[in-house]
Image (spheres, rainbow, N blue to C red):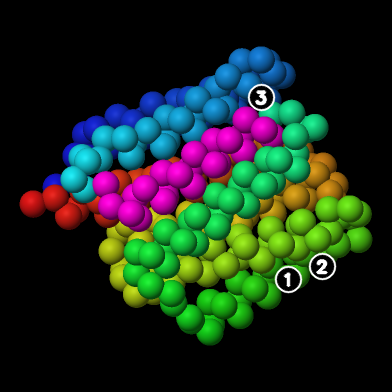
């Protein structure tokens, strides 16, 4: 049985931290923001630490490690000089999400979702391409990986309409949106409230994934 009280408490703490981080970043309190941003991600992934050891399956472990790489990416992206390393950290996170999704229910090939997602990913890449410069190949690989992650995440929902898989389907779409906004802001044209939109969609994504993994694990509890 899922402990919804504990889950709600951690989600509320994460929400408060996220709002505080967004406000401090917007108001220009850089040092406070640099502390609150990783702390918010730590709060989100801490939910998985409350899964009993006997229910900590391979799927949960992979999700936790993937979220840890997201945390590393958060820290690295606080300094623009480490952008490439942050990109690599998130790339590894997406690869681990793919492995977790496939390990959980197997590889799923669904033509319609494949065509839609990869057409969207391709359109975004070719729109950004003239402004990518030396980042063209890394960004292309990143787009392919995150699109594949979204495809397999949605595949879980297409096979099982349980609430946890609905959350994963929304999560992977939010992740694609967050990374697209980040790329537009960095490579195409900076826009108003970019950081707010990027953070909101990003934390929604990993929050949904963490909650989905928590529910999937604890629903197996006798």
Q: Are marks 2 and 1 in contact (CB under 8 Å)?
A: yes
Task: Classify mark 1: helix, strand or loop.
Answer: helix
Residue 215 visible in this rendered orientation of the protein: no
Residues at marks 2 and 1, CA–CA distance in whole angstroms: 6 Å
Residues at marks 1 and 3, CA–CA distance in whole angstroms: 32 Å
Q: Label 3, on which residue?
A: 25
**Residue drawn 49% across the image and 47% down it:** 66
Q: Are marks 1 and 3 in contact (CB under 8 Å)?
A: no
Q: Label 2, on which residue?
A: 126
Give the left or right position of residue 53, taking residue 185 as reference: left
Which comes sooner in the sequence, label 1 or label 3?
3
Asked if residue 197 lies in the magenta stretch, the reply is no
- Judge by depth and name the residue closer to the eye, 121 or 57: 57
Give the left or right position of residue 132, taking residue 198 as reference: right
Asked if residue 60 lies in the magenta stretch, the reply is yes
Residue 219: x %, y % from top left: 19, 53
Residue 184: x %, y % from top left: 78, 51
- The span shown in magenta is 56-77
């Amino acid at each position: 049985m899922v402990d919804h009280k504990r889950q709600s408490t951690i989600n509320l703490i994460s929400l408060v931290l996220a709002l505080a981080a967004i406000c401090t970043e917007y108001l220009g309190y850089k040092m406070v923001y640099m502390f609150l941003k990783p702390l918010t991600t730590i709060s989100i992934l801490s939910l998985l630490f409350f899964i009993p050891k006997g229910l900590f399956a391979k799927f949960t472990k992979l999700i936790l490690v993937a979220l840890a790489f997201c945390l590393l990416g958060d820290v690295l992206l606080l300094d623009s000089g480490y952008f490439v390393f942050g990109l690599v950290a998130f790339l590894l996170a997406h690869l681990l999400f793919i492995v977790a999704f496939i390990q959980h229910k197997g590889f799923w090939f669904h033509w319609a979702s494949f065509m839609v997602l990869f057409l969207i990913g391709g359109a975004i890449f070719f729109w950004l391409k003239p402004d990518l410069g030396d980042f063209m190949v890394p960004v292309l690989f990143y787009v392919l990986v995150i699109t594949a992650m979204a495809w397999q995440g949605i595949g879980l929902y297409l096979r099982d309409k349980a609430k946890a898989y609905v959350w994963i389907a929304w999560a992977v779409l939010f992740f694609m949106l967050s990374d697209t906004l980040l790329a537009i802001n960095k490579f195409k044209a900076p826009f108003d409230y970019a950081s707010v939109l990027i953070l909101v969609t990003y934390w929604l994504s990993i929050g949904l994934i963490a909650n989905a993994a928590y529910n999937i694990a604890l629903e197996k509890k006798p």
